[in-house]
Amino acid sequence: MLRSPLARFAGTWLLLGSLSASAQPKATEAKATEAKATEPGTQVPSWAYLFVATGPMERVEAAFAEMRMPLPQVLSREHLEEAFPFIGPGGIRPGGSVGMLMGAGDPGSTEPSGILLFPVTKDAAPLKGFSELGGRVLPDASDTVKIKGTYFRRTKGFLLTGPKGEYITDADPLGLEENLTGPGTLASVDVDLERWRKTDPTTFYPLLSDKEPTPGDEARHVYALGRSLGTRVYERLLNRVRLSVLDNGTSLRLRMGLEPLAPGEIAPLPRPSFPASIIGRLDIAYSTPESSQWLQSITEEFMNAAEKDGLFAEAEKAKLNVEQTRSLIKEVLETFCIADAISLAVEPVKGGKLVYHQVNQYRAAANFTARLSGLLEKIHELDRQGGGRGSSIGLTTYSAGGARISRLTFPGKKSLTVDFVDSGTTVRLVASGDTQRRVPGLLKLPASGTLTSGFSGSFDPSAAVDAYVASGGSMPLPLRTRVGVRGQQVTWTTRAEGAAAVVDLDIPKPLAQAIVQLVGSRAVDLEASDQP
């Protein structure tokens, strides 16, 4: 999303690194002029809509070393000192954070502007060196000089550089850095979308337009709607996005704060149990009945777009009532997908097949079975309208495990079944490609805690790999999973923090190492990480 404006800005300032060694300021003992005092912990300045920074450099280096992963050049102190020769060898402060602030360019400009922040040692990049190169000290900022349209500010612990003097002199690098020294912080990104929309619409609104749709895509109404929904999220729904990467001990944590989407307080509900062999699970809990209805409006919009694209043309040819068809689709989604809490899971079984699990929980009796029976009658009636026999989906019951269990079957798909048990406020469903009765064995499983997070879950990559291989798939890269990795899971939870919904995604470090290696198209040998 930020690729184009960010790349253009960063690329421009990387050209500073092409300054010849002969233009490098001479090493002197001159004391850098101190900037005016500011309150510690100062937030991003009011002109900036994007702030990107590392945590303390030595902490970042240690994290990469611990996981035996190569440090990217952009995070290497030696590389930065070489690319920006006015800093000089050993000039980057090990405990400091490298950062960038980005804001609007000059009036009429179609490019953003901003500044780079380099943490430097006491004697590195003295202001006197820039003055000797012809730099002119600003009358109202004795710690800042201007050289041919570029400003350099040497303040306590930092060297700042950029094309706008007012940005340079307004920034509080120590205040920003203070917020990056918290436990485990490796990197931080803060995007103020509301500020971006207001102060720099020229670069904000093309964000989703970097890739032009093909003529065929552009003509499709469903494609256009999907694009429109994505645009609405960043144009209207979100005001601010904060991303952080944290070293959480045995795992890496990706923390994402979304404003103003703070969830309401969720009254606890039981966290359903699933078979131990599941690949992953997703739990969604709503704070109010109204908040669970979001799917309805989106469904209506998508069906409107789909109708324009001719999705219901076959129904019209079969002389089916399109409005009735649309109504049934909505009712199916409402029946199966709207509840006070929904828990989903996928289980691999023999033969490379997958079994789908779902548990719906309601704070009041939902009459699920009665609603489903009425829905099936409507589907059968629609089938009769199209010349069928009105028995497109079967519903039978059987008793097992002390419960009455219902089964849905589908004509032409003898092996596809959906079994469910309805207790009034809880409905457990199991969908599979066979006729095995799995629900009875699940009824005795105790709850695995409580649901208090609006959006939580887990994913077991090793189980997913096993299931993929069992289904006949082959891995593009050699993958040997050591015992220590098997069963380790990626997990996530959501909570409210002020106006933000905060999502914490935790990835065990060995898995993070494997992901980086896969992305880098390198052979993944997790057993090798056992070696000292």
Image (cartoon, rainbow, N blue to C red):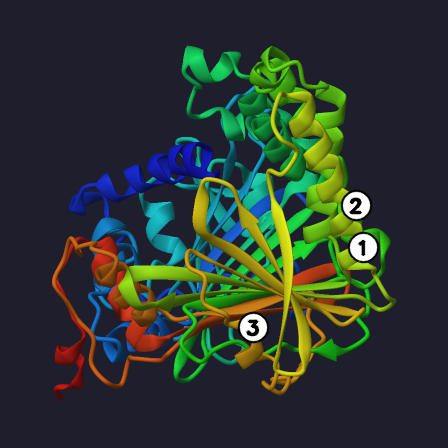
Q: Amino acid at mark 2?
A: Gly
How far is the residue under mark 1 from the one under mark 2? 6 Å
Q: Amino acid at mark 3?
A: Val
Q: Is residue 175 left or right of residue 460?
A: right
Q: Residues within 10 Å of mark 3 (few under 14, many from 20)?
A: many
Residue under the point 27% across and 69% down: 513
Residue under the point 50% across and 72% down: 438
Viewer can see residue 521: yes
Of residues 157 and 138, the one nearer the viewer is 157
Q: Which residue is mark 2?
A: 374
- Residue 99 in the image, given as x and y percentages of width and height: 45, 56
How far is the residue under mark 3 from the one under mark 2? 23 Å
- Residue 124 in the image, given as x and y percentages of width and height: 33, 64
Q: Which residue is mark 3?
A: 439
Q: Please say if 39 is above or below 44.
A: below
How far is the residue under mark 3 from the one under mark 1? 20 Å
Task: Identify the element where label 3 is drawn.
Answer: helix
- Residue 214 in the image, given as x and y percentages of width and height: 41, 16
Number of dots carrying numbers: 3
Task: Identify the element where label 1 is drawn.
Answer: helix
For marks 3 and 1 on the same chain, the one whose residue lies earlier in the sequence: 1
For marks 3 and 2 on the same chain, the one whose residue lies earlier in the sequence: 2
Q: What number is the disc on residue 461?
A: none
Q: Which residue is mark 1?
A: 370
Q: Residues within 10 Å of mark 2 (few under 14, many from 20)?
A: few
Q: Are marks 1 and 2 in contact (CB under 8 Å)?
A: yes
Residue under the point 20% across and 81% down: 482
Q: Residues within 10 Å of mark 1 (few under 14, many from 20)?
A: few
Q: Please say if 260 is above or below 12.
A: below
Q: Is residue 414 left or right of residue 340?
A: left
